[in-house]
Image: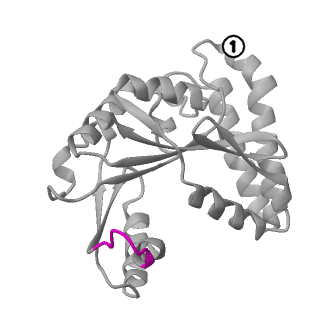
Amino acid sequence: MQGIAERDTNPIVQLKITAVETIDKLRSETTGKRLKSFAGYFNFAFSYKVVFLSDMKDLREEDFDIEPEEGVAINASFMLGNLISKPGCLKNLMTVMRKINLSIMVVSEVEGNHNSPTFVNRFIEALFSSLRHYSTILLYLTALQKGVAQDKKNSMENREGIHSIVAAEGYERVTRSVPISVWRAFFARFGLVELELSTASVYQACLIVEQFSCGKSCTLDTNSKCILVGWKGTPLYSISSWKFN
């Protein structure tokens, strides 16, 4: 928000944020109040709206109040992976994004391979991939945050993720992480092309990492046009940007 307010080219007149929520409407509304308070420091109009849905398949173009001359950016942060078990929802989301004339979409997802349809393959993945992934997450969380309560919370979240991969089936198997190569193939089916992340954004990410005492253990590697965020060389997350061709 501060960056777009201070840029010299293409100054904005109004910033509109629409939060699409399927779980916790109150949390999104609270976030909106904080953002509105912060926006008061800058010289542009600001509005915030929450669209609460019981299911992403109910999302419609009409849920967004978009004027013809407005540019549209989507921040899809760790939400597309939750829809892998619901292909109809993913397809509907892609359709709506095309209708609202998307300018850019930034996607952050877990960089993993935990989506085999058969139990045996998933169990092997859990032994050689998933456990390594989650153990690495625990290592960097331990380095970043100290405290018994936080450790218990992190252990519970990781336990649920591993249980979902190994023991759950159907819609109950919500943890279905796939690598960036799979997302590239999926997005290509809908006419999305990958954009290279700007040098400025990568530089900013490096500056943030350097602020932490354990920052040297965090790795930022390029994979074609995206960035892989890792811990001591193990990729954990991918960050990529897309637009319709």
Residue 10 belongs to the span the image colors magenta: yes
Give the residue at x 44% y 78%: 6
Residue 99 location (% of width, % of height)? 21, 40
Q: Magenta residues: mostly which secondary structure?
A: loop
Instruction: In the rendered view, tell whether residue 210 sits above or below residue 6.
Output: above
- Which is nearer the eye, 43 or 97? 43
Number of numbered discs on residues: 1
Work out whether residue 138 or residue 213 is closer to the camera in this orientation and state it.
213
Whether residue 148 is visible, yes or no, is yes
Left or right? Give the position of 131 relative to 41. right
The residue most toward the bottom is 41
Secondary-structure class at tag 1? helix
Q: Position of residue 122 (x, y in %)?
A: 68, 19
Occupied quadrant, residue 26: bottom left
Report the magenta residues as a range.
6-12
User: Where does label 1 land, which residue?
Assistant: 121
For the C terminus, the quadrant is top left
- In reply to whether residue 13 is colored magenta, the answer given is no
Left or right of 9 in this view: 180: right
Q: Report whether 190 appears left or right of 111.
A: left
Q: Is residue 109 above or below residue 37?
A: above
Where residue 48 sits in the image (x, y, percent)? Answer: 30, 69
Query: Three-letter amino acid code at disc 1?
Result: Asn
Residue occupying the point 84% across, 50% down: 139
Q: Is residue 176 visible?
A: no
